[in-house]
Structure formats: C-alpha cells, structure tokens
Amino acid sequence: MREEARRWIAQGDADLAYARASCEAGFYFGAAFACHQAAEKWLKGAIIELQRRLPPKTHNLVELGRTLGVPEDVMSDLRLLNPEYATSRYPDAANGVPAENYDLRKARQLLEATERVQRWVTSALTAQR
C-alpha cells in the first residue's frame, strides 16, 4: 500500500477508536463526529490507493463514495454519516445544542454504519492486491 494511503487509513482507524471511547464516556456528539471523520479518511485513503490520485478536497462522504463507486448499501451508510460533520458540532446546523441531540442509541447506529464502511474499504483494498 502506498504510504500516503496507509496514513489516511491508519488515522481513520484511530478516529474509530476515538469514536468508541467517546461513546463509552457518554460523549455521543463527539462519537458522531469521529465516525464521520473515520469514514472520510478511509475513503480518501482508498481513493489514493485504488485510483492513484489525490482525493477531492471535500468532507462530503456521498461525493467521496461516488468517486469510488461504492455499492448502494455503503452509500446508505455514507448518507447517514454525512450530516455529522456539521450537526454534531454546530448549534446552527444542529437546530439546537449538538450535545443534547445525541444518545447511546444514535451513537451506536452511527458506529455500526462506520464499521460497515470500514469493512467495505478493507475489502476493496484487499481485492486490489
């Protein structure tokens, strides 16, 4: 694997660990943001490795997924995660206090979606070898 791609993937893995720790600590809004970040970094790493080019400079998971041609089930997970870039952090995007808009159930839903994205990226990278 190209070193630059490996770095993106490794940071995505660290973001997932951070999301899990945030969830366990009750910081569900933080878990939501870290889930988005993990997915974004895995997708960007996959673009670098599979398409041999720099990824688009965007935080839009749907756009990154389209760039890679991910299957519809993964696109569904990306659509679920996509708003978390802003709504988990900004009151104007969240229509309230982000910390008050999340609970364990929501955080677990986002973690499960993130783990499915991780499995797809891992599979795509393994198939490429």
Image: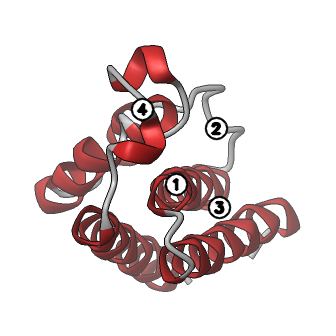
Q: Is residue 100 above or below residue 110?
A: above
Distance from disc 2 to disc 1, alpha carbons, whole Å, reads: 8 Å
Q: Residue at x 49, y 29 (%)?
A: 86
Q: Which residue is mark 3?
A: 49
Q: What amino acid is found at the position of numbered circle 4 in the picture?
A: Thr
Q: What amino acid is found at the position of numbered circle 3 in the picture?
A: Glu
Q: Which residue is mark 1?
A: 43
Q: Residue 17 falls in which quadrant of the image?
A: bottom right
Q: Residue at x 44, y 37 (%)?
A: 98
* Figure label count: 4
Q: Residue at x 51, y 83 (%)?
A: 24
Q: Residue at x 22, y 70 (%)?
A: 105
Q: Tag 2, which secondary structure?
A: loop
The earlier-in-sequence mark between 3 and 1 is 1
Distance from disc 2 to disc 3, alpha carbons, whole Å, reads: 10 Å
- Residue 9 rendering spot, x and y as whole percentages: 67, 69
Disc number lying in front (2 or 4) = 4
* Quadrant (top left/top right/bottom left/bottom right) for the N terminus: bottom right
Q: Is residue 93 above or below residue 34?
A: above
Q: Which residue is mark 4?
A: 87
Distance from disc 3 to disc 4, alpha carbons, whole Å, reads: 30 Å
Q: Specify whether residue 8 is in view.
A: yes
Disc number lying in front (3 or 4) = 4
Q: Is residue 45 left or right of residue 50?
A: right
Distance from disc 3 to disc 1, alpha carbons, whole Å, reads: 10 Å
Q: Tag 1, which secondary structure?
A: helix
Disc number lying in front (3 or 1) = 1
Disc number lying in front (2 or 3) = 2
Q: Which residue is mark 2?
A: 55
Q: Nearer the viewer, residue 78 or 89?
A: 89
Q: Tag 3, which secondary structure?
A: helix
